[in-house]
Image (cartoon, coloured by chain):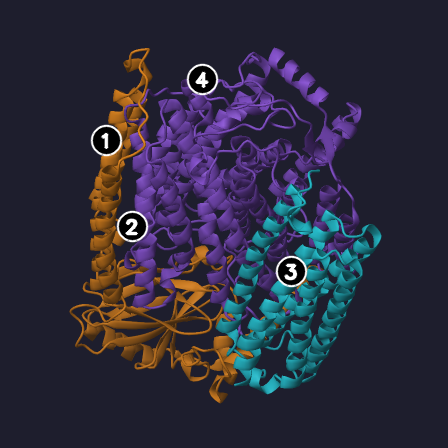
Chain colours: A cyan, B orange, C purple
Amino acid sequence: MKIDHSLPLEYSTEENRLKIFGFWIFLGAEIMLFATLFASYFTLYNRTGSGPNGAEIFHITPVLLETILLLTSSFTIGLGVHAMRLGRQKAMMGFFVVTLLLGLAFLGVEIFEFVTYVHEGAGLQTSAFTSILLTTLGTHGAHVTVGLFWGLYILIQVKRDGLTPETGNKSFIFSLYWHFLDVVWIFIFSFIYLKGMM
Amino acid sequence: MKLKMALFAIMMSIVTVLTGCEQLTVLDPKGPQAERLASDIMLTMLMMAGIVIVVFVMLVIMLVKYRASKQPADYEPPHIEGNPWVEGILVGIPVLIVAFLSIVSVQSNYIVESAPQGYEDKEPLVVYASSSNWKWHFSYPEEDIETVNYLYIPTDRPLEFRLYSHGPITSFWIPQLGGQKYAMNAHVTKLHLAADVEGEYMGRNANFSGEGFAENQFDVTAMSQKEFDEWVEEVKETAEPINEAKFEELLEPGHLGRMTFTGTHLEFSPAPEHHHEGDKYEEEHNHSDEHHSASRKESSDRKHMNYNE
Amino acid sequence: MEFFERFAIPHPSIAIYASMVAAGLTMIAVIAGLTYFKKWGYLWREWITTVDHKRIGIMYLISALLMLFRGGVDAIMMRAQLAVPENKLLDAQHYNEIFTTHGVVMILFMAMPFIIFFMNFVVPLQIGARDVAFPRLNALSFWLFFMGAMLFNISFMVGGSPDAGWTSYFPLADGESVGSHYYMIAIQIAGIGTLMTGINFITTILKMRAPGMTLMKMPMFTWASLITSVIIVFAFPVLTVALAMGTMDLLFGTQFFTLDNGGMAMLWANLFWVWGHPEVYILILPAFGIYSEIISTFSRRNLYGYKSMVGSMVLISLLSFVVWAHHFFTMGQGAFANSIFSITTMAIAVPTGVKIFNWLLTLWKGKIEFTTPMLYSTLFIPLFTLGGVTGVMLAMSAADYQYHNTMFLVAHFHNVIIPGVVFAMLAGLTFYWPKMFGFMLNEKIGKWTAWLLSIGFLLAFMPMYVTGLDGQARRMYTYSESTGFGPLNMVSFIGAAIMAVGFVLIVYNIYYSVRYASRDISADPWDARTLEWATHTPVPEYNFAITPEVASSEALWDVKKKDHVLFKGDYEKIHMPNNSGVPFIMSCIFFAWGFSLVFSLWIPAIITTIGIFVCMTLRSFEKDHGHYISVKEIEDTESELRGA
């Protein structure tokens, strides 16, 4: 395999460049996926049937907590990739561990939030509104969950193999994915929670 | 080449047959809305026939003139990139055609969505047409009567149909009076028609709605206002009143013949006219809510039975 | 016993039992044959685990042809049922199941794999690449598609077929039988595969072209594939979400498309067609690409108006996303909304017209040779034009109130799909057959087939325009004699039967050509113009021993006429990906997962979900750097192929 040392580690082989490009296209598909969920949400959000509406169930505290956790994790993974480019494996792994822990905490709060909703009578089957709300949030949450496992696997591989073009490439792609989830969350925060609470 | 010519002749004869077929239901309108649509259809069909002929003629010329067998063996076809003028014309002419048709289309849209032309100042007859598996229920709120699977209408008077469905999406269609429109569960759609001529017309659900769809038809009879009034009187004297229990029975999946009632089901099971947004229903809609959950339960019971058979 | 009763067919008939027996016997025969001839190892090594784009392409082709006959049998049964009034051949339920499966099978499991076959086989060769960007993902795409198709196809034998139409509108698709579950889950599995194909080909085309091949020097089929892939990536996620929502409504009691608690049935219709309309352009654009290649090859000149061809495809792809509401003009969305969608829909006629005229002008001053592929293409132009202009008629939203849901509409979309897509597939199949298998299909039988299909097509579908205008609604399993639809429907049936003969002739042609066709053909039997004909037949595993250098969109023609040199330099060792069984195994688990969900078997569903994630985990930890083909091996292969 030809390694081009003039480029950052994650871009250094032809295969790596293809993978990063392909992943961007994949993120394009993911944008369409979430756009469809958002469009459905805006169509259904006042179709509450006999169930509660957004203002009745949304609470600002867990949502703010989730936002802070996820935004911070996006920052720490950025630091992780920076460390990787400097070739500092320990620092990179440290930042990745912090990122995953923040992601785990986010997921914990989100599960708590879902349990609260169900207790307040806003389950998946209550109304069109609660169905699309929980599906949209749940799709994001499922992406975070998958990300946690994926990130963990990459950490194990970096530990096993050190920083190679291959592990560097995987880490970088993972960081793209993680940033993307953060961007989606910002949309969820603004257009679902803030709009719903107003 | 003979085959090709034969093919061409077949296609041309089909076009001629099509344009000559005034007796086809849709092209035999009996009301102003259907008339507008039929004239739109004929107009586009003729314009499109023109385009088809241009393409056919060009194709035949190219194929005849530039066949390899007609060229010298050493003929080298030239390299031609394209020409902005030619391509401009190829874009320009279709744009003009589409622009013209767009204007016609937009005009027709507003015409078919409002009171029929020539009937603007007459008071419309309001009929609620609701579908259930696989029947049509026609409620005449002013006359306070209801029929199943047949529709009597006066001529020379605009008709305002308010459509909705007790089950799957259906489409209310009387081709000789006008186009079709969906009847859906969550809200009422409106269709404006009018009949110029007395007579019997075919009406049906055009949108696939399950096992009994093929037979989901109704008869339409257009008659003079006087005859219509007499019929209403007769119904009031002879028909039985409709009540909630009876109506629930009618909604059971299946086919029914013609039926006639006094009163309408709208009194105890109103049309979903006010929840366009589908948000929290008013008190008065609880009935229909219960009804839906009842039929839902029924279908899940049925599913259960299927598994246990 | 109660557990097994769910797998019973709700509406059994002799035809279904007969096909169960036939399917069982075929399975036994295939297994016995493979065992007897000791071909299991060959099948596993050379096909199931392959990541070679050419072999994956051929597997797509085989699946597509099988599904063509499955859907074709459905079509014949429908036409037979309607041939005479009040026919008792099929009852309403069977008719409903048959037209539903006909639609799904033909669009998703016949036309889609057929175009993906062309993309797989042709695009890497046409751009001078060694394979697609992600060969392993490509194998996964195929196997997911295949398993989704198989899951859908067993529905009529296990549990019951879907019966709510290929559009599966709610609340009609209420899950009374498991048919709707099959629909949602099988299409989901196949759809994920297609989405990955889209991602793969965008990356391949944008990143792996031969040196010198700028975007505006790509052959037209590659352009079509690129645009199609972009549409796939933007449209399929919408389907993914819609199907997921439908599945949750059916399995978990959510309220998206239900009748109460705020559910909105028309949301399904909207989401379905936001995917569904671009989907028809996903099918037709590669078909346009194939016609462009064929018409230019057999007119012996370059494609007229290359730039406007590309521009019109880009425009079509953009417009395809803003016309979806024309599928339900009659839902009462108001004159304004209908006007907007009416105009956008008619606007598509402009770029499509440009393409038709460009093809006509490609014939101009050419030296036209009527080979079978060219015959299909010249039949395509007039027949497709008929379908195109009726499309403009349907786009008149007010007039559509009379066409909607009638046989007029059925005639229209078959009129664009059969001459547009199916003819392109058959033309392309005949065109690329020698490149794939090293011999040509018989020209005489091929031309007979093209004529039979065209005449059969006209007889089958022209009458539908008439009966549609006479008030025959689509999807009716029967009609009364008094309607007067009888004679024209009989003509349709005769046309369908003629088409069936045409399709059987294709099989006969393959059989005949396998036995009698000459194996002594050159690598470029059609005297073609693009790169895929510049390599050997059969194409070696690595496609090109030396990466070609290109100066125009017709690289091979430049070699023939302008003394262009494609292959410069010496052999170097070539890096190739390794075969892998994981895509196949993972797709089998997907099949089991889908089957468990269809029948709400929760424990197997959880186990298979874990199985899928285990496969992904293994993939993450796997170290697979592919292998190298040495210069010695390349030299040997090349000299052998040149000698042959």
Give the Cα separation between the discs numbered 3 and 2: 46 Å
**Badge 3 is on which residue?**
A177
Secondary element at tag 4? helix
Tag nearer the camera, 4 or 1:
1
- Pointer 4 residue: C444
Asked if disc 2 and disc 1 are in contact, CB closer than 8 Å, the reply is: no
Give the label, 3 or 2, closer to the camera.
Answer: 3
Local crowd size for mark 4, using a 10 Å CA cut-off: few (<14), some (14–19), many (≥20): few
Q: How far apart are marks 2 and 1 (CA)?
A: 22 Å
Tell me if residue A145 comes above or below residue C590 in the rendering: below
Tag 2, which chain? C
Residue at left offset 56%, top offset 64%: A34
In the drawing, what numbered circle is on residue B57? Answer: 1
Report the front residue among B282 and C266: C266
Q: Distance between the residues labelled 3 and 4?
A: 55 Å
Amino acid tagged 1: Val
What is the three-letter code of the residue carrying label 3? Tyr
Q: Which amino acid does label 2 sit on?
A: Met
Position of residue A36 relative to residue C516, above or below, is below
Q: Whole-Å distance between the Cαs marked 4 and 2? A: 37 Å
